[in-house]
Image (spheres, coloured by chain):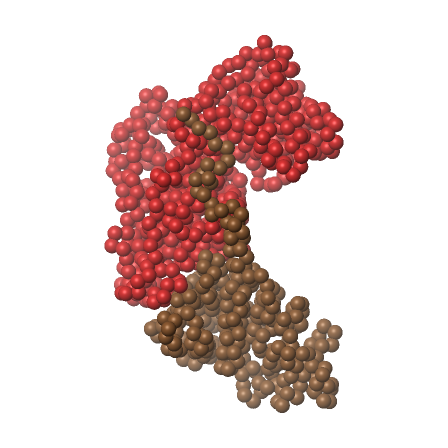
Chain colours: A brown, B red
Amino acid sequence: MNATTLTKKDYKSDQDVRWCPGCGDYAILNAVQGVFAELQMDRAKTVIVSGIGCSSRFPYYMNTYGFHTIHGRAPAVATGIKLANPELDVWVVTGDGDALSIGGNHFIHALRRNVGLKVLLFNNRIYGLTKGQYSPTSLVGAVTKSSPNGAMDNPFTPVSVALGAGAAFVARTVDVFGKHLQETLRETAAVKGSAFVEILQNCNIFNDGAWMHVTDKDIKDDHVVELRAGQPLRFGKELSHGLRLRGFEVEKFQVGTEGGAEDCINWNPSTPNPGLAFAMAQLNEREMPVPLGVFRNVERANYEQSVHAQIAEARAKLGNGDLKKLLHSGDTWTVS
Amino acid sequence: MSTGQSDAKVKVEVVEEIVIRFAGDSGDGMQLTGTQFTTTSALVGNDLATFPDYPAEIRAPAGTLPGVSAFQVRFASTDIHSPGDAPDALVAMNPAALKVNLKELKKGGLIIVNEGNFGKIDLEKATYTYNPLESSDLDGFQVVRVDLNKLTREALAGLGLDTKSTLRCKNFFALGMTYWVYSRPIEPTLKWMEGQFKKRPELVEANQRALKAGYNWCDITGVFQTRFEVPPAKLTPGKYRNIMGNQATAIGLIAASRLANLQLFLGSYPITPASDVLHDLSKMKQYGVVTFQAEDEIAAVCSALGAAYAGNLAVTTTSGPGLALKGEALGLAVMTELPIVVIDVQRGGPSTGLPTKTEQADLLQAVYGRNSEAPLCVLAASSPSDCFAATVEACRIALEHMTPVILLTDGYIANGAEPWLLPEIEALKPIKTSFRTNPEGYLPYSRDPVTLARPWVKPGTPGLEHRIGGIEKADGTGNVSYDPANHEFMCRTRAEKVARIANHFPEATVKGAQSGKLLVLSWGGTYGSVAAALEHCEKQKHSVGWVHLRHLNPFPRNLGELIKRFDKVLVPELNLGQLIRMIRDQFVVHAIPFNKIQGRPFMTSEVIGAIEKELG
């Protein structure tokens, strides 16, 4: 298997893809298969785990190992797989409802522990598979089947939740930005601990245009800021604007008239304190640009490695555990 | 031992068995005291059974009735099965302990009571409006009043311990007294103290002094006119150790992982009374055990399912409320036909119920508690030491039949202890597991013609990449299928697969009468009480048959035939009637329920009463 070069086709399963025509998931599937081929990922060692929802059908379409589990529980199942066999490359595919509503607990705890899982969250701000109810990322006022007068709950920002949970690698990309998506996936594949990627994804049936301000050619330059390590935060046509810090607030300004280029925040996703990454994740998307790219990238002890290190340590100290000795431990006596 | 001046007057009486109960405040160390008495009695060679009974609160308000913690030990020179009904002796550390336990003590029984804790406030906390020590409440009992507080202080004088630390040793003064009365050696406990308080030499000294002082006090004062001796029991020859059910379960899991040559994975969330299995396995890392304390019960079972998928012997331990949360994931385990073992240490319910008390009311939940048709195998352990064999069997069935298995134990056998005749490791049958590696003609949902098990493939195996999940599977390929006929076929196949497990374990046997008027049909942790009741019936020449079930789903193949041999079937259960429903569902039977749901095991006398009522 290693001898032959695998192509994108080799990562496609024999199952017909059954997402709605025009769904953003197609582009993501295509990008994942492309990057997997490019990286020559070992199909046998790759496991894709998902929960429930449109995005969670993903494993069926990948010619790797795959486990389509139950609603919200993919990170928990994936944690078990990774702990049982740390050699496996485990990817979790989930959605905004799956990861942040029913599965919120597993999501934050997997990131907190820094289990070596790559979590791809397709965020379309709607429940698609159940045909159009508001999700935990729907905006206040979103009119859906279950919120005819507008949703009232304040939405989660997935990146903020991930940062709050202590995630070591956090990124955001967009279904239709092929190049950026592939670049992000490539970076994700190299992460040793938990990697979290929010992929802004369009549901053209139930929430079409949810990310229009990010993806529309005419306006996107004014609404997107790219986070690149070592680069200043600039956006707008011809990078007319920049982002700078005023106290704990991030503010935008016109470079030249309202401040100098040197005022821009120079992006560093690897600072010890995640405060600025959090501030960027919390930018109000109606007034400020939406950051794309890597919010956070730091090294932390990897959970499954720590677990197996403790086992190795115990074995080094106590030997490999003799069953007979275990049975006969404690106070014993003989009846003759 | 020191020879007291009063030895000449002391009569030594040899008795077959004694039941003693230690009762005090939940901070008084009664569980520890009882456990030490148990260990020592085991080393002396007695057969024994224990019943720890403690409140759910770690420290309920001191001195109050809900704060009473008790530990009952029955030790005998004969083969016994239960911790006994009424104690022969009660050690009461305070008024509350006396009030709660007095009514269960045998008439004429011995009471060792700490009169140092019978001040006005102590009595009020126990809702006494009078001092029971000065009342007729204790008429007819042999009462030994002793100020444990004062005597312990005196014994520890000069050690420089503060009052609080000093008084914490008084349970060992009391233990020393009981060692004297029941002719037990104090050395095993002295030795245990050296290990237990290794880092605090002053506490080793203090506790040892208290224990010795209690023993010697009896020797010197001559308060007791009689000492008792319970000779060693004539048990099957071999090597024994004292074991609690949860310990046996943990060891059973390690043994199963060795027999199957698989890494053991335990995904668990802390819950009373199951947590000790997680604690024990967390300490056994050298056996290659991966323990994972999950964020919740659902994550615990899901992580186990992931580990099973990855090729481990995967286990989750829980109690009733946790099993309820695991239901959906167990449905996924049924659908994906992966081998996982769920150990439910049952407790009183519903809801939070009685977390530290025992019950057998999760049977229907275990057998039926999932959406749709989701059959799985259900077993139950019958005694503390039987948790070992039952656990090994649960793992064997899961792995050899590629199915989830629920093993039901309960708080009573999980925390209770008994001597365990250690099995010969060489005699344990290996567990057959095989991972498919050949890609030729591989179908994820092809089946073994005998067991109907599907092949187990470890991710990482080249050429066998495949997808599984909770959506209905097409027969053979395992691809997503909404075909109506396929769904019915798969539902029936999953049911048949579980039913066929019965072809692989022994048929049930009847003890006692092989046919006739009455069959007692019991299951799980009531074994000890029912066994003792049946022994009594045998002595009385009552004609009764008895079947005790380990296999609850599927039932032993011959169960229907056995039931038919009797006019009626008495089903004793610690619930409101669960096995009886399953029996009535499957067999034409005149079944009579006998139920108790008080968070406590059956007393032998209760079971005898129920049997004799049916015999007329």
Residue B203, quarter of the rendered image = top right
Residue B441, quarter of the rendered image = bottom left
Q: Nearer the viewer, residue A158 or A79?
A: A79
Q: Is residue A131 visible?
A: no
Specify whether B536 is left or right of B141. Answer: left
Q: Nearer the viewer, residue A325 or B27?
A: A325
Say which residue appears at 69% left-offset and 33% top-offset.
B202
Say which residue appears at 32% left-offset and 41% top-offset.
B583
Q: Position of residue A10 (x, y in %)?
A: 37, 75
Say which residue appears at 50% left-offset and 68% top-offset.
A118
Q: Position of residue B458 (x, y in %)?
A: 38, 60
Q: Nearer the viewer, residue A332 or B562?
A: A332
> Where is A169 relative to B57, above or below?
below
**Quadrant of the snapshot with the C terminus of chain B:** top left
Say which residue appears at 50% left-offset and 18% top-offset.
B229
**Quadrant of the snapshot with the N terminus of chain B:** top right
Q: Is residue A44 visible?
A: yes
Residue B592, quarter of the rendered image = top left
